[in-house]
Amino acid sequence: MNLWAWRTDRKLHLGVSENTDLQSVCDITVAAPHIDSIAGLWAMFPSLSSVIAQCQEWLQIKALRCSVSSHDLVQPLNLDECWAAGVSYQVSRDARVEESRDNPDVYRRVYNAERPELFFKAPGNRVVGPNQTVGLRRDSAWQVPEPELTVIIGPDGNVFGYTAGNDMSSRDIEGENPLYLPQAKLFHHSAAIGPSIALAGTWDPSNAVITMSITRQSRTVFTGDVPIKRMRRTIPELMWYLRREWPLAEWTALMTGTGLVPPPTFTVLDGDMIHVTISGIGTLTNLAKRIDPSWVRVPDVP
C-alpha cells in the first residue's frame, strides 16, 4: 500500500494505492478535504494500524479513484530530519577504500564493526522530492548519487514506511580526508526522497531491488541494480543506534546506505537526470544542477 502526494491547480493532494500504479490512486483529499498531507493523516489516525485500516476503507470507494501524472508528484512527506548510514554494503566499503588511499582501514573497520556509520544528512526542509533539482558542489570534481532504501520513522518512533532516497555525495572530498565527510554529504539539495511511501507491514523491503540509471542528453551513461538483501546491516540495528542518546524528531528519514557505486572514472555533470527506482515504491527522478551563488529558486525538472 503506497501513499502519494501531488499538486494540481496549486492544491496539494494525498492519495493511496494498492501498488505503484499511478493510474489507480485513491484521492484521500477528495474524501477528506482537511487531509492533504501525511502529517494531517496521522493527526486523524495516530497509529500505523489505524492509517492502514482507514486507507483500506477509502480504497473500496471507486469514485475516489483517479490518475496521477508523475510530473505532478511532490515530496510525499515533509520531514523534520534526514539521517543516513554509510558503508552498509560491501561494494560501498570497497569504493570508500579505493577513493581513500591514505586511510583505507577506516572503512574496512567500520564495515565489520558493531557500531555502524551514521551521519546527519539534512534538516527536513532541505530535502527535495520527485521532479526537483539536486545539487552539485562547485568545489568537487567527483560527485555521484547514492540510491538508498530510506526508512520513514513516524511520531511514535516506529517504522511508518519506506521510500527511495538519493544521497548525493562528493567522493573526492571524502576521499581526501574522512573528516571531510560533512562537507562531502551536506550541501544545497544534497538529499532527495520519493516518489511514494510504502506503508510498513504492507510491503517487504527484503525482496526489493534498487535500480539506478543516469541519463545525459537523453543518453544513458550509467545503469545498475542491487538487491536490498545484500545490505550488511539490518533496519532495526540502524534504528537502534540512531535513537541511542538522540531523541528522534517527529518525522525522521533514515537512508540505509548504497549498494550501487559508479566506476571511478564517472562523475555526475550539470544537467544529468538521475532515476532511482525501488520495486514496490516507484522511480525518484531528479535533475542535477551545479550550485551557484545566484541559485535562489531551484527549478523543477522540465
Image (cartoon, rainbow, N blue to C red):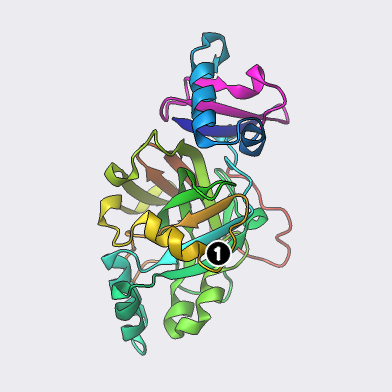
Q: Which residue: 47% across, 25% down?
A: 17
Is 1 situated above or below 224?
above
Figure disc tally: 1
Task: Give residue 26's position: percent from left, percent from top.
Answer: 53, 20
Return the residue nearer the eye: 211 or 290: 211
Q: Which residue: 49% across, 56% down?
A: 254
Q: To which quarter of the image does residue 200 belong?
A: top left
Residue 227 shows in this picture: no
Q: Secondary structure at mark 1?
A: strand
Q: Is residue 14 magenta?
A: yes
Q: Is residue 301 magenta?
A: no
Task: Give residue 162's position: percent from left, percent from top.
Answer: 45, 44
Q: Which residue: 54% across, 43% down?
A: 130
Is 94 situated above or below 272?
below
Which quarter of the figure is the N terminus placed in? top left
User: Is the residue marked by circle 1 packed among few (<14), some (14-19), or many (20+) residues within 10 Å?
Assistant: many
Q: Amino acid at mark 1?
A: Lys
Task: Give residue 131's position: percent from left, percent from top.
Answer: 56, 43
Is 122 situated above or below 64?
below
Return the residue nearer the eye: 230 or 199: 199
Query: Where are the magenta residues, as a range?
Result: 9-36
Q: To which quarter of the image does residue 233 belong?
A: bottom left
Task: Give residue 108's position: percent from left, percent from top.
Answer: 29, 79
Relative to residue 34, is residue 207 drawn left or right?
left
| Residue at image mark 1 | 121
Residue 233 shows in this picture: yes
Is 249 situated above or below 50?
below
Relative to residue 11, is residue 220 drawn left or right?
left
